[in-house]
Each structure stands twice: as C-alpha cells, then as structure tokens.
Amino acid sequence: MQGTLKAQTSKPQTYWLVGASAGIGLALCEKLLQAGDQVIASSRTAQDHSALQSLVQKYPDHLTLLDIDVSDTDQLDARCKQAWSAFEGIDCWIYNVGSYEPLTLDQWQFSQFEQMNQTNYLGAVGLMIALRP
C-alpha cells in the first residue's frame, strides 16, 4: 500500500507539541490545525511568539499556547496539568525540543554539554514522568 495512512477518527485528536515555535514544530502545528485537530503548542516563549499568535487568531478554538522550559524541572508537573486540562486530555505528546552547540575540542565546556543533555534528553524524561497516569 502506498501513500500516507491516517487513522480514521470521529473526533479531532488532541496533540501537545513541545517545541512548536520554529521549523518542523511550527509546520507540524499548522498541519495539525489544518486537519481539524486540537493543539497545545509549547516552547519557552510560546505565548509571545508572533507566528503562534497568528495561528491562534486563525484557529482560536483549536490552539492553546503554553510556555514551558523543559530544563526547569520544578514547573513540569504544573505545565503537564495545564496541558492536560486545555482540551480535557491529550491523545498524543510530541517532544520536538532540541539544542546543539557545535564546538571544537578547545571550546569544550561541561556546562554546554550539560545544557544540551538537559534539553535533548532529560527534558523529555521529566515530561514523561510528569505525564504518566
């Protein structure tokens, strides 16, 4: 079978897209909204992001913006509760957060590797723990 398969559902799906402010995340957010799905779009500054604000104007009943800094573990539980309550549940969570700093050997600093690990790996782990039932 060729082509893209999409599950047939009678109601819109609710997606929490963490890392929705640029690139693939922003494009995916728009595609989900065009398909009639509900989206909680998150980034560190989602509520102030002009492209996301434009999408809210276009899809006011299907898009909620939620600021989150995945490296701030103290806020993860509260943000998960906010995301969950935005549309009374979440069908799919997408972690599209990434940080990368290209470094030469003489530029290596532990803090840079720690920040990339916190964002790229531990942020996802923290959200998975906070989201579990």
Image (cartoon, helix red, strand yellow):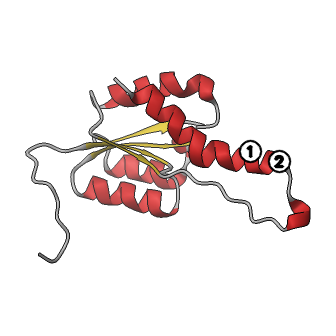
What whole-number distance in Å separates the C-alpha atoms at marks 2 and 1? Answer: 6 Å
Q: Quadrant of the C terminus?
A: top left
Q: Along the horizontal axis of the image, is 5 left or right of 44?
A: left
Residue 20 makes an appearance in the image: yes
Q: Residue at x 40, y 31 (%)?
A: 83
Q: Is residue 110 placed above or below 64 in the rendered structure?
A: below
The residue that mark 1 highlights is 114
**Amino acid at pointer 1:** Glu
Q: Image quarter for residue 72?
A: top right
Above or below, comparing residue 11 to residue 130 in the picture = below
Q: Position of residue 48 (x, y in %)?
A: 56, 43
For label 2, count other residues whose C-alpha is less than 10 Å away and answer few (under 14), some (14-19) or many (20+): few
Q: Foreground residue, 86 or 4?
A: 4
Residue 11 appears left or right of 40: left
Q: Which mark is residue 73?
A: none
- Identified at 61% across, 23% down, the residue is 74
Label count reads: 2
What residue occupies the far bottom of the structure in this picture? Answer: 2
> For mark 2, what is the residue?
110
Question: Taking 119 as reference, is 26 left or right?
Answer: left
Q: Secondary structure at mark 2?
A: helix
The residue lying at 86 percent from left, 52 percent from top is: 109
Q: Viewer-proximal residue, 23 or 77?
A: 77
Q: Position of residue 37 (x, y in %)?
A: 24, 48
Which quadrant would the N terminus be assigned to in this image? Answer: bottom left
Instruction: Give the class, few, some or many, for how many residues have Cα within 10 Å of label 1's Cα (few <14, many ≥20).
Output: few
Residue at disc 1, secondary structure = helix
Give the residue displayed 27% in from the left and 27% down from the top.
Answer: 88
- Whether residue 44 is visible to the viewer of this picture, yes or no, is no
